[in-house]
Amino acid sequence: MRGVETVLFLVVVATVVATFAKRLRVPAPSLLVVAGVALGLLPGAAAVQVTPEMISLVVLPPLLFAAGEELPWRDLRAVGRPVAVLSVGLVLLSAAAVVGTAVLVTPLPVGMAFVLGAVLASTDPVAVTALARRLALPPRVQALIQAESLFNDATSLLLFRVALFLAVAGGAASWGRTAGEFAILAGGGVAVGVLTALGAFLIRRRTEDPVLETVISLVTPYAGYVVAESVGGSGVTAVVVASVILGTQAERLTTARIRLQVGAVYQTVVFLLESVVFGLIGLQLPTLVRRLTGNGAWWLLQAVAIAVTLVLVRLLLVFLLSAIRQRRGGQRLSWQVPAVVSWAGARGVVPLAAALSLPVSTLDGSALPARDLVLLLTTAVIVLTLVVQGFTLAPLVRRSGIALDPADLRTEFSAARRKLAEAGLDHLRHLAETESAPEFVVDQLRTGWQARLERIEDDDGENSADLERRIDYRTLRRELIDVEAAELTRLFEKGEITDGTRRRIQRLLDLEHAGLE
Protein backbone atom coordinates (compact mmCIF):
# COMPACT_ATOMS: atom_id res chain seq x y z
CA MET A 1 0.00 0.00 0.00
CA ARG A 2 3.02 2.23 0.57
CA GLY A 3 3.70 2.36 -3.18
CA VAL A 4 0.16 3.49 -4.02
CA GLU A 5 0.30 6.18 -1.34
CA THR A 6 3.65 7.40 -2.68
CA VAL A 7 2.33 7.65 -6.23
CA LEU A 8 -0.80 9.53 -5.15
CA PHE A 9 1.29 11.86 -3.00
CA LEU A 10 3.60 12.54 -5.94
CA VAL A 11 0.64 13.40 -8.16
CA VAL A 12 -0.57 15.95 -5.61
CA VAL A 13 2.93 17.39 -5.25
CA ALA A 14 3.33 17.50 -9.04
CA THR A 15 0.12 19.49 -9.42
CA VAL A 16 1.38 22.10 -6.97
CA VAL A 17 4.86 22.10 -8.51
CA ALA A 18 3.47 22.46 -12.05
CA THR A 19 1.46 25.50 -10.93
CA PHE A 20 4.53 27.17 -9.45
CA ALA A 21 6.64 26.14 -12.45
CA LYS A 22 4.33 28.01 -14.80
CA ARG A 23 4.38 31.11 -12.62
CA LEU A 24 8.16 30.99 -12.20
CA ARG A 25 8.65 30.09 -15.89
CA VAL A 26 10.89 27.13 -15.07
CA PRO A 27 10.61 23.56 -16.40
CA ALA A 28 8.36 21.40 -14.28
CA PRO A 29 10.57 18.24 -14.51
CA SER A 30 13.53 20.07 -13.00
CA LEU A 31 11.39 21.50 -10.21
CA LEU A 32 9.87 18.05 -9.60
CA VAL A 33 13.31 16.50 -9.19
CA VAL A 34 14.29 19.19 -6.70
CA ALA A 35 11.03 18.64 -4.80
CA GLY A 36 11.65 14.88 -4.77
CA VAL A 37 15.15 15.27 -3.36
CA ALA A 38 13.88 17.71 -0.72
CA LEU A 39 11.11 15.31 0.33
CA GLY A 40 13.55 12.41 0.47
CA LEU A 41 15.84 14.36 2.82
CA LEU A 42 13.08 15.05 5.34
CA PRO A 43 13.42 13.23 8.68
CA GLY A 44 11.36 10.05 8.70
CA ALA A 45 11.04 9.90 4.93
CA ALA A 46 10.40 6.34 3.80
CA ALA A 47 12.99 4.59 1.63
CA VAL A 48 11.88 4.51 -2.00
CA GLN A 49 12.61 1.48 -4.14
CA VAL A 50 11.93 1.91 -7.85
CA THR A 51 11.60 -1.34 -9.81
CA PRO A 52 12.84 -1.68 -13.39
CA GLU A 53 9.45 -2.99 -14.51
CA MET A 54 7.72 0.14 -13.28
CA ILE A 55 10.01 2.39 -15.32
CA SER A 56 10.57 0.37 -18.49
CA LEU A 57 7.14 -1.23 -18.88
CA VAL A 58 4.62 1.08 -17.17
CA VAL A 59 6.06 4.59 -17.55
CA LEU A 60 8.33 4.56 -20.60
CA PRO A 61 6.10 3.41 -23.56
CA PRO A 62 3.36 6.08 -23.36
CA LEU A 63 5.86 8.88 -22.70
CA LEU A 64 7.97 7.81 -25.68
CA PHE A 65 4.85 7.52 -27.81
CA ALA A 66 3.73 11.02 -26.91
CA ALA A 67 7.21 12.41 -27.66
CA GLY A 68 7.35 10.65 -31.03
CA GLU A 69 3.93 11.89 -32.10
CA GLU A 70 5.10 15.47 -31.54
CA LEU A 71 7.93 15.00 -34.07
CA PRO A 72 6.78 16.06 -37.57
CA TRP A 73 8.01 13.90 -40.43
CA ARG A 74 8.85 16.96 -42.53
CA ASP A 75 11.28 18.32 -39.95
CA LEU A 76 12.66 14.84 -39.20
CA ARG A 77 13.70 14.34 -42.82
CA ALA A 78 15.48 17.70 -42.80
CA VAL A 79 17.74 16.68 -39.89
CA GLY A 80 18.19 13.01 -40.76
CA ARG A 81 21.95 13.13 -41.38
CA PRO A 82 23.05 14.96 -38.20
CA VAL A 83 20.64 12.82 -36.17
CA ALA A 84 22.29 9.66 -37.52
CA VAL A 85 25.77 10.97 -36.66
CA LEU A 86 24.78 12.00 -33.14
CA SER A 87 22.77 8.84 -32.48
CA VAL A 88 25.79 6.64 -33.20
CA GLY A 89 28.99 8.67 -33.02
CA LEU A 90 28.13 10.81 -30.00
CA VAL A 91 26.81 7.82 -28.05
CA LEU A 92 30.04 5.86 -28.62
CA LEU A 93 32.24 8.85 -27.80
CA SER A 94 30.25 9.68 -24.64
CA ALA A 95 30.43 6.10 -23.42
CA ALA A 96 34.21 5.98 -23.94
CA ALA A 97 34.68 9.30 -22.14
CA VAL A 98 32.58 8.19 -19.15
CA VAL A 99 34.53 4.93 -18.92
CA GLY A 100 37.80 6.85 -18.79
CA THR A 101 36.51 9.30 -16.18
CA ALA A 102 34.96 6.55 -14.05
CA VAL A 103 38.20 4.55 -14.01
CA LEU A 104 40.11 7.67 -12.89
CA VAL A 105 37.79 9.09 -10.22
CA THR A 106 35.72 6.15 -8.94
CA PRO A 107 36.54 2.77 -7.37
CA LEU A 108 34.56 0.99 -10.11
CA PRO A 109 36.29 -1.92 -11.86
CA VAL A 110 36.74 -1.52 -15.61
CA GLY A 111 33.78 -3.78 -16.41
CA MET A 112 31.35 -1.78 -14.26
CA ALA A 113 32.82 1.49 -15.56
CA PHE A 114 31.91 0.24 -19.03
CA VAL A 115 28.37 -0.47 -17.78
CA LEU A 116 28.10 3.05 -16.35
CA GLY A 117 29.34 4.55 -19.61
CA ALA A 118 26.78 2.58 -21.61
CA VAL A 119 23.96 3.60 -19.26
CA LEU A 120 24.74 7.33 -19.46
CA ALA A 121 25.86 7.48 -23.09
CA SER A 122 22.59 8.64 -24.65
CA THR A 123 20.29 11.56 -24.03
CA ASP A 124 16.82 10.80 -22.76
CA PRO A 125 13.75 11.45 -24.97
CA VAL A 126 11.35 11.91 -22.07
CA ALA A 127 13.54 14.45 -20.28
CA VAL A 128 14.57 16.28 -23.47
CA THR A 129 10.97 16.51 -24.72
CA ALA A 130 9.70 17.69 -21.34
CA LEU A 131 12.40 20.37 -21.09
CA ALA A 132 12.13 21.58 -24.69
CA ARG A 133 8.32 21.54 -24.90
CA ARG A 134 7.98 25.04 -23.44
CA LEU A 135 10.72 26.62 -25.58
CA ALA A 136 9.98 28.41 -28.85
CA LEU A 137 12.84 26.74 -30.73
CA PRO A 138 13.09 26.84 -34.53
CA PRO A 139 11.51 23.72 -36.07
CA ARG A 140 14.78 22.16 -37.25
CA VAL A 141 16.54 22.72 -33.93
CA GLN A 142 13.58 21.26 -32.05
CA ALA A 143 13.46 18.28 -34.41
CA LEU A 144 17.23 17.69 -34.13
CA ILE A 145 17.22 17.69 -30.33
CA GLN A 146 14.12 15.54 -30.06
CA ALA A 147 14.97 13.08 -32.86
CA GLU A 148 18.46 12.46 -31.54
CA SER A 149 17.11 11.54 -28.12
CA LEU A 150 14.48 9.28 -29.70
CA PHE A 151 16.73 7.39 -32.10
CA ASN A 152 19.94 6.89 -30.12
CA ASP A 153 18.42 4.04 -28.13
CA ALA A 154 19.61 1.19 -30.36
CA THR A 155 23.25 2.25 -30.02
CA SER A 156 23.14 2.82 -26.26
CA LEU A 157 21.16 -0.37 -25.62
CA LEU A 158 23.65 -2.40 -27.66
CA LEU A 159 26.52 -0.91 -25.66
CA PHE A 160 24.66 -1.70 -22.45
CA ARG A 161 24.13 -5.34 -23.42
CA VAL A 162 27.78 -5.77 -24.39
CA ALA A 163 28.95 -4.08 -21.18
CA LEU A 164 26.58 -6.20 -19.10
CA PHE A 165 27.88 -9.37 -20.77
CA LEU A 166 31.45 -8.39 -19.93
CA ALA A 167 30.59 -7.53 -16.33
CA VAL A 168 28.34 -10.52 -15.60
CA ALA A 169 29.91 -13.27 -17.69
CA GLY A 170 33.46 -11.99 -17.54
CA GLY A 171 34.08 -13.02 -21.15
CA ALA A 172 35.19 -11.23 -24.27
CA ALA A 173 32.73 -9.74 -26.71
CA SER A 174 32.63 -11.03 -30.28
CA TRP A 175 32.52 -8.32 -32.94
CA GLY A 176 30.43 -10.54 -35.22
CA ARG A 177 27.96 -11.26 -32.47
CA THR A 178 27.86 -7.57 -31.54
CA ALA A 179 27.04 -6.56 -35.11
CA GLY A 180 24.33 -9.19 -35.25
CA GLU A 181 22.79 -7.96 -32.00
CA PHE A 182 22.79 -4.39 -33.30
CA ALA A 183 20.99 -5.51 -36.46
CA ILE A 184 18.39 -7.37 -34.40
CA LEU A 185 17.95 -4.47 -31.97
CA ALA A 186 17.58 -1.76 -34.58
CA GLY A 187 16.01 -3.80 -37.39
CA GLY A 188 13.66 -5.69 -35.08
CA GLY A 189 12.59 -2.48 -33.37
CA VAL A 190 11.89 -0.73 -36.68
CA ALA A 191 10.01 -3.73 -38.11
CA VAL A 192 7.81 -4.16 -35.03
CA GLY A 193 7.21 -0.40 -34.94
CA VAL A 194 6.01 -0.38 -38.55
CA LEU A 195 3.74 -3.38 -37.97
CA THR A 196 2.38 -1.84 -34.78
CA ALA A 197 1.59 1.40 -36.56
CA LEU A 198 -0.06 -0.48 -39.45
CA GLY A 199 -2.19 -2.55 -37.08
CA ALA A 200 -3.24 0.47 -35.04
CA PHE A 201 -4.04 2.41 -38.21
CA LEU A 202 -6.28 -0.35 -39.62
CA ILE A 203 -8.12 -0.81 -36.33
CA ARG A 204 -8.60 2.87 -35.58
CA ARG A 205 -9.83 3.58 -39.10
CA ARG A 206 -12.69 1.18 -38.43
CA THR A 207 -13.50 2.39 -34.94
CA GLU A 208 -16.02 5.13 -34.26
CA ASP A 209 -16.48 4.65 -30.53
CA PRO A 210 -14.53 7.35 -28.64
CA VAL A 211 -13.92 5.08 -25.65
CA LEU A 212 -12.57 2.22 -27.75
CA GLU A 213 -10.49 4.65 -29.77
CA THR A 214 -8.92 6.03 -26.60
CA VAL A 215 -8.20 2.55 -25.25
CA ILE A 216 -6.56 1.47 -28.52
CA SER A 217 -4.43 4.60 -28.55
CA LEU A 218 -3.25 3.93 -24.99
CA VAL A 219 -2.57 0.23 -25.62
CA THR A 220 -0.60 0.78 -28.86
CA PRO A 221 2.74 1.85 -27.26
CA TYR A 222 2.61 -0.99 -24.73
CA ALA A 223 1.89 -3.53 -27.47
CA GLY A 224 4.78 -2.31 -29.63
CA TYR A 225 7.18 -2.29 -26.69
CA VAL A 226 6.31 -5.77 -25.40
CA VAL A 227 6.33 -7.42 -28.84
CA ALA A 228 9.68 -5.85 -29.79
CA GLU A 229 11.32 -6.90 -26.52
CA SER A 230 9.95 -10.44 -26.85
CA VAL A 231 11.61 -10.92 -30.27
CA GLY A 232 14.93 -9.41 -29.18
CA GLY A 233 14.42 -5.98 -30.72
CA SER A 234 14.48 -2.57 -29.12
CA GLY A 235 11.15 -1.77 -27.51
CA VAL A 236 12.03 1.92 -27.37
CA THR A 237 12.78 2.00 -31.11
CA ALA A 238 9.52 0.18 -31.87
CA VAL A 239 7.46 2.69 -29.87
CA VAL A 240 9.25 5.65 -31.44
CA VAL A 241 8.81 4.38 -35.02
CA ALA A 242 5.13 3.58 -34.45
CA SER A 243 4.48 6.99 -32.89
CA VAL A 244 6.20 8.93 -35.70
CA ILE A 245 4.24 7.01 -38.35
CA LEU A 246 0.89 7.39 -36.59
CA GLY A 247 1.65 11.05 -35.87
CA THR A 248 1.79 11.73 -39.61
CA GLN A 249 -1.62 10.08 -40.07
CA ALA A 250 -3.44 11.71 -37.15
CA GLU A 251 -5.89 13.66 -39.33
CA ARG A 252 -6.78 10.56 -41.35
CA LEU A 253 -7.28 8.19 -38.45
CA THR A 254 -10.39 9.44 -36.72
CA THR A 255 -12.97 12.17 -36.47
CA ALA A 256 -12.39 15.59 -34.95
CA ARG A 257 -14.37 14.74 -31.81
CA ILE A 258 -12.34 11.59 -31.14
CA ARG A 259 -9.05 13.37 -31.78
CA LEU A 260 -9.97 15.95 -29.17
CA GLN A 261 -10.86 13.27 -26.63
CA VAL A 262 -7.75 11.16 -27.26
CA GLY A 263 -5.57 14.28 -27.08
CA ALA A 264 -7.07 15.31 -23.76
CA VAL A 265 -6.62 11.81 -22.29
CA TYR A 266 -3.02 11.59 -23.48
CA GLN A 267 -2.16 15.00 -22.03
CA THR A 268 -3.48 13.80 -18.68
CA VAL A 269 -1.59 10.49 -18.85
CA VAL A 270 1.66 12.21 -19.82
CA PHE A 271 1.31 14.72 -16.98
CA LEU A 272 0.66 11.96 -14.42
CA LEU A 273 3.49 9.70 -15.59
CA GLU A 274 6.02 12.52 -15.88
CA SER A 275 5.03 13.73 -12.44
CA VAL A 276 5.53 10.31 -10.90
CA VAL A 277 8.78 9.40 -12.66
CA PHE A 278 10.61 12.71 -12.16
CA GLY A 279 9.44 12.85 -8.57
CA LEU A 280 10.64 9.27 -7.99
CA ILE A 281 14.06 10.10 -9.45
CA GLY A 282 14.46 12.82 -6.86
CA LEU A 283 13.06 10.69 -4.02
CA GLN A 284 15.34 7.77 -4.83
CA LEU A 285 18.59 9.72 -4.57
CA PRO A 286 18.59 10.15 -0.73
CA THR A 287 17.72 6.46 -0.36
CA LEU A 288 20.70 5.41 -2.47
CA VAL A 289 22.99 7.79 -0.57
CA ARG A 290 21.96 6.26 2.77
CA ARG A 291 22.60 2.78 1.38
CA LEU A 292 26.22 3.73 0.52
CA THR A 293 27.11 5.33 3.86
CA GLY A 294 30.71 4.13 3.63
CA ASN A 295 31.44 6.11 0.48
CA GLY A 296 31.18 9.49 2.22
CA ALA A 297 30.57 12.50 0.03
CA TRP A 298 32.91 11.31 -2.70
CA TRP A 299 29.97 10.07 -4.76
CA LEU A 300 28.87 13.68 -5.37
CA LEU A 301 32.28 14.74 -6.70
CA GLN A 302 32.38 11.62 -8.85
CA ALA A 303 28.93 12.34 -10.27
CA VAL A 304 29.87 15.95 -11.00
CA ALA A 305 33.02 14.80 -12.81
CA ILE A 306 31.03 12.36 -14.95
CA ALA A 307 28.32 14.93 -15.72
CA VAL A 308 30.96 17.51 -16.72
CA THR A 309 32.61 14.89 -18.95
CA LEU A 310 29.32 14.22 -20.74
CA VAL A 311 28.71 17.93 -21.29
CA LEU A 312 32.25 18.60 -22.56
CA VAL A 313 32.20 15.66 -24.98
CA ARG A 314 28.84 16.74 -26.33
CA LEU A 315 30.00 20.35 -26.70
CA LEU A 316 33.14 19.26 -28.51
CA LEU A 317 31.46 16.99 -31.06
CA VAL A 318 28.42 19.19 -31.72
CA PHE A 319 30.53 22.31 -32.24
CA LEU A 320 32.94 20.37 -34.46
CA LEU A 321 30.16 18.98 -36.66
CA SER A 322 28.46 22.37 -36.81
CA ALA A 323 31.70 24.11 -37.85
CA ILE A 324 32.32 21.55 -40.61
CA ARG A 325 28.76 21.91 -41.91
CA GLN A 326 28.90 25.71 -41.84
CA ARG A 327 32.26 25.74 -43.64
CA ARG A 328 30.97 23.47 -46.37
CA GLY A 329 27.90 25.62 -46.84
CA GLY A 330 29.94 28.83 -46.97
CA GLN A 331 28.19 30.13 -43.87
CA ARG A 332 29.61 32.30 -41.15
CA LEU A 333 30.57 30.35 -38.04
CA SER A 334 28.05 30.85 -35.23
CA TRP A 335 27.79 29.50 -31.70
CA GLN A 336 24.08 29.89 -31.01
CA VAL A 337 22.54 26.70 -32.44
CA PRO A 338 25.34 24.28 -31.44
CA ALA A 339 25.34 25.75 -27.92
CA VAL A 340 21.62 25.12 -27.49
CA VAL A 341 21.83 21.63 -29.04
CA SER A 342 24.77 20.77 -26.79
CA TRP A 343 23.11 22.02 -23.62
CA ALA A 344 19.87 20.12 -24.33
CA GLY A 345 21.45 16.72 -23.68
CA ALA A 346 19.75 15.87 -20.40
CA ARG A 347 19.62 12.33 -19.01
CA GLY A 348 16.47 10.89 -17.49
CA VAL A 349 14.10 7.94 -17.56
CA VAL A 350 15.82 5.62 -20.07
CA PRO A 351 19.23 5.62 -18.30
CA LEU A 352 17.44 5.05 -14.99
CA ALA A 353 15.57 2.04 -16.41
CA ALA A 354 18.83 0.57 -17.71
CA ALA A 355 20.61 1.02 -14.38
CA LEU A 356 17.71 -0.51 -12.45
CA SER A 357 17.78 -3.58 -14.71
CA LEU A 358 21.30 -4.54 -13.60
CA PRO A 359 21.34 -8.04 -12.06
CA VAL A 360 22.42 -8.44 -8.46
CA SER A 361 24.83 -11.32 -9.17
CA THR A 362 27.17 -12.65 -11.85
CA LEU A 363 26.87 -16.01 -13.60
CA ASP A 364 29.00 -17.75 -10.95
CA GLY A 365 26.64 -16.59 -8.19
CA SER A 366 28.83 -13.89 -6.69
CA ALA A 367 27.48 -10.40 -6.08
CA LEU A 368 27.78 -7.99 -8.98
CA PRO A 369 30.54 -5.61 -7.87
CA ALA A 370 29.67 -1.95 -7.20
CA ARG A 371 26.08 -2.31 -8.46
CA ASP A 372 24.75 0.16 -5.87
CA LEU A 373 27.45 2.70 -6.75
CA VAL A 374 26.55 2.50 -10.46
CA LEU A 375 22.90 3.07 -9.60
CA LEU A 376 23.78 5.98 -7.29
CA LEU A 377 26.04 7.67 -9.85
CA THR A 378 23.46 7.20 -12.59
CA THR A 379 20.71 8.76 -10.48
CA ALA A 380 22.98 11.59 -9.35
CA VAL A 381 24.01 12.44 -12.94
CA ILE A 382 20.34 12.39 -13.99
CA VAL A 383 19.43 14.78 -11.17
CA LEU A 384 22.37 17.07 -11.99
CA THR A 385 21.53 17.31 -15.70
CA LEU A 386 17.83 17.82 -15.07
CA VAL A 387 18.45 20.55 -12.51
CA VAL A 388 21.48 22.39 -13.95
CA GLN A 389 20.68 22.09 -17.65
CA GLY A 390 16.94 22.22 -17.06
CA PHE A 391 17.00 25.53 -15.20
CA THR A 392 19.55 27.14 -17.54
CA LEU A 393 18.35 25.92 -20.95
CA ALA A 394 15.65 28.58 -21.34
CA PRO A 395 17.99 31.48 -20.43
CA LEU A 396 20.55 30.10 -22.90
CA VAL A 397 17.91 29.98 -25.64
CA ARG A 398 16.96 33.59 -24.90
CA ARG A 399 20.62 34.66 -24.81
CA SER A 400 21.36 32.94 -28.12
CA GLY A 401 18.51 34.76 -29.84
CA ILE A 402 17.39 31.71 -31.84
CA ALA A 403 13.97 31.46 -30.19
CA LEU A 404 11.04 32.23 -32.43
CA ASP A 405 9.63 35.70 -31.85
CA PRO A 406 6.11 35.52 -30.32
CA ALA A 407 5.05 38.37 -32.61
CA ASP A 408 6.18 36.38 -35.65
CA LEU A 409 4.31 33.33 -34.42
CA ARG A 410 1.15 35.39 -33.96
CA THR A 411 1.57 36.82 -37.45
CA GLU A 412 2.07 33.34 -38.91
CA PHE A 413 -0.97 32.07 -37.04
CA SER A 414 -3.16 34.93 -38.28
CA ALA A 415 -1.89 34.64 -41.85
CA ALA A 416 -2.62 30.92 -41.91
CA ARG A 417 -6.14 31.49 -40.55
CA ARG A 418 -6.71 34.16 -43.20
CA LYS A 419 -5.66 31.80 -46.00
CA LEU A 420 -7.95 29.10 -44.65
CA ALA A 421 -10.90 31.50 -44.55
CA GLU A 422 -10.13 32.60 -48.12
CA ALA A 423 -10.10 28.96 -49.21
CA GLY A 424 -13.53 28.51 -47.64
CA LEU A 425 -14.89 31.60 -49.42
CA ASP A 426 -13.50 30.34 -52.74
CA HIS A 427 -15.34 27.07 -52.21
CA LEU A 428 -18.56 28.96 -51.46
CA ARG A 429 -18.18 30.91 -54.71
CA HIS A 430 -17.79 27.62 -56.55
CA LEU A 431 -20.95 26.26 -54.92
CA ALA A 432 -22.87 29.40 -55.84
CA GLU A 433 -21.68 29.31 -59.47
CA THR A 434 -22.57 25.63 -59.91
CA GLU A 435 -25.79 25.89 -57.86
CA SER A 436 -24.69 22.89 -55.84
CA ALA A 437 -26.37 24.09 -52.65
CA PRO A 438 -29.41 26.18 -51.64
CA GLU A 439 -28.70 29.84 -52.29
CA PHE A 440 -29.86 31.11 -48.88
CA VAL A 441 -27.57 28.62 -47.12
CA VAL A 442 -24.61 29.71 -49.24
CA ASP A 443 -25.39 33.38 -48.53
CA GLN A 444 -25.58 32.79 -44.79
CA LEU A 445 -22.30 30.86 -44.79
CA ARG A 446 -20.64 33.49 -46.94
CA THR A 447 -21.60 36.13 -44.39
CA GLY A 448 -20.15 34.07 -41.58
CA TRP A 449 -16.94 33.26 -43.45
CA GLN A 450 -16.51 36.88 -44.47
CA ALA A 451 -16.79 37.87 -40.81
CA ARG A 452 -14.16 35.25 -40.00
CA LEU A 453 -11.87 36.66 -42.66
CA GLU A 454 -12.25 40.14 -41.23
CA ARG A 455 -11.77 39.17 -37.60
CA ILE A 456 -9.62 36.00 -38.19
CA GLU A 457 -10.46 34.35 -34.90
CA ASP A 458 -14.14 35.13 -34.75
CA ASP A 459 -16.25 32.06 -34.00
CA ASP A 460 -18.65 32.67 -36.84
CA GLY A 461 -20.92 35.26 -35.27
CA GLU A 462 -23.63 35.05 -32.64
CA ASN A 463 -26.77 34.56 -34.74
CA SER A 464 -26.11 31.16 -36.31
CA ALA A 465 -27.90 29.03 -33.70
CA ASP A 466 -31.10 28.78 -35.75
CA LEU A 467 -29.25 28.10 -38.99
CA GLU A 468 -27.15 25.35 -37.40
CA ARG A 469 -30.34 23.41 -36.81
CA ARG A 470 -30.69 23.00 -40.56
CA ILE A 471 -29.08 19.84 -41.85
CA ASP A 472 -27.91 21.54 -45.04
CA TYR A 473 -26.23 24.31 -43.10
CA ARG A 474 -24.33 21.88 -40.86
CA THR A 475 -23.32 19.76 -43.82
CA LEU A 476 -21.91 22.71 -45.71
CA ARG A 477 -20.11 24.03 -42.65
CA ARG A 478 -18.41 20.66 -42.21
CA GLU A 479 -17.49 20.73 -45.90
CA LEU A 480 -15.93 24.18 -45.53
CA ILE A 481 -13.99 23.09 -42.47
CA ASP A 482 -12.66 20.11 -44.44
CA VAL A 483 -11.56 22.52 -47.17
CA GLU A 484 -9.73 24.61 -44.57
CA ALA A 485 -8.12 21.46 -43.15
CA ALA A 486 -6.86 20.51 -46.61
CA GLU A 487 -5.48 24.02 -47.09
CA LEU A 488 -3.79 23.80 -43.70
CA THR A 489 -2.10 20.54 -44.73
CA ARG A 490 -0.94 22.14 -47.99
CA LEU A 491 0.57 25.12 -46.16
CA PHE A 492 2.44 22.83 -43.78
CA GLU A 493 3.73 20.47 -46.47
CA LYS A 494 4.99 23.44 -48.50
CA GLY A 495 6.86 24.70 -45.44
CA GLU A 496 4.93 27.97 -45.12
CA ILE A 497 3.95 27.34 -41.50
CA THR A 498 5.54 25.52 -38.56
CA ASP A 499 4.21 22.37 -36.94
CA GLY A 500 3.20 24.31 -33.82
CA THR A 501 1.00 26.64 -35.87
CA ARG A 502 -0.48 23.68 -37.75
CA ARG A 503 -1.40 21.90 -34.51
CA ARG A 504 -2.98 25.04 -32.99
CA ILE A 505 -5.14 25.67 -36.04
CA GLN A 506 -6.04 21.99 -36.38
CA ARG A 507 -7.31 22.01 -32.82
CA LEU A 508 -9.50 25.05 -33.57
CA LEU A 509 -10.91 23.31 -36.65
CA ASP A 510 -11.51 20.13 -34.65
CA LEU A 511 -13.32 22.08 -31.95
CA GLU A 512 -15.52 23.75 -34.54
CA HIS A 513 -16.18 20.46 -36.30
CA ALA A 514 -17.03 18.77 -33.01
CA GLY A 515 -19.40 21.63 -32.12
CA LEU A 516 -21.43 20.88 -35.26
CA GLU A 517 -21.91 17.30 -34.08
Image: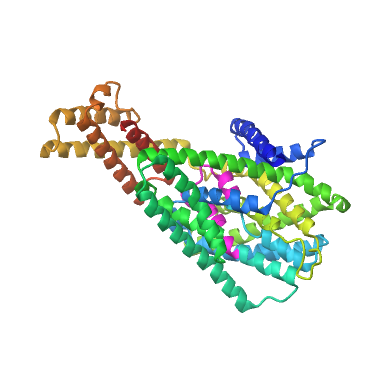
Quadrant where the C terminus sits is top left
Q: Give the magenta range.
A: 126-155
User: Is 289 placed above or below 96 here?
Assistant: above
Quadrant where the N terminus sits is top right
Q: How many marks?
A: 0
Residue drawn at x 33%, y 47% is 489
Residue drawn at x 79%, y 36% is 42
User: Is 410 placed above or below 351 here?
Assistant: above
Q: Is residue 141 visible to us here?
A: no
Front residue of this view, candidates 281 and 360: 360
Residue drawn at x 64%, y 50% is 54
Q: Is residue 356 left or right of residue 461?
A: right
Q: Is residue 22 visible to us here?
A: yes
What is the quadrant of residue 469 in the picture?
A: top left
Main secondary structure found in the magenta portion: helix
Colour treatment of the image: rainbow
Q: Residue placed farthest to the front in the image?
A: 1
Q: Give x and y (percent) for residue 53.
A: 64, 53
Front residue of this view, candidates 227 and 485: 227
What is the quadrant of residue 111 in the picture?
A: bottom right
Decide whether residue 216 is among the magenta residues: no
Q: Is residue 106 left or right of residue 186?
A: right
Q: Is residue 418 left or right of residue 351?
A: left
Q: Give x and y (percent) for residue 65.
A: 51, 50
Decide whether residue 150 is among the magenta residues: yes
Q: Give x and y (percent) for residue 432.
A: 13, 35
Q: Give x and y (percent) for residue 424.
A: 24, 37
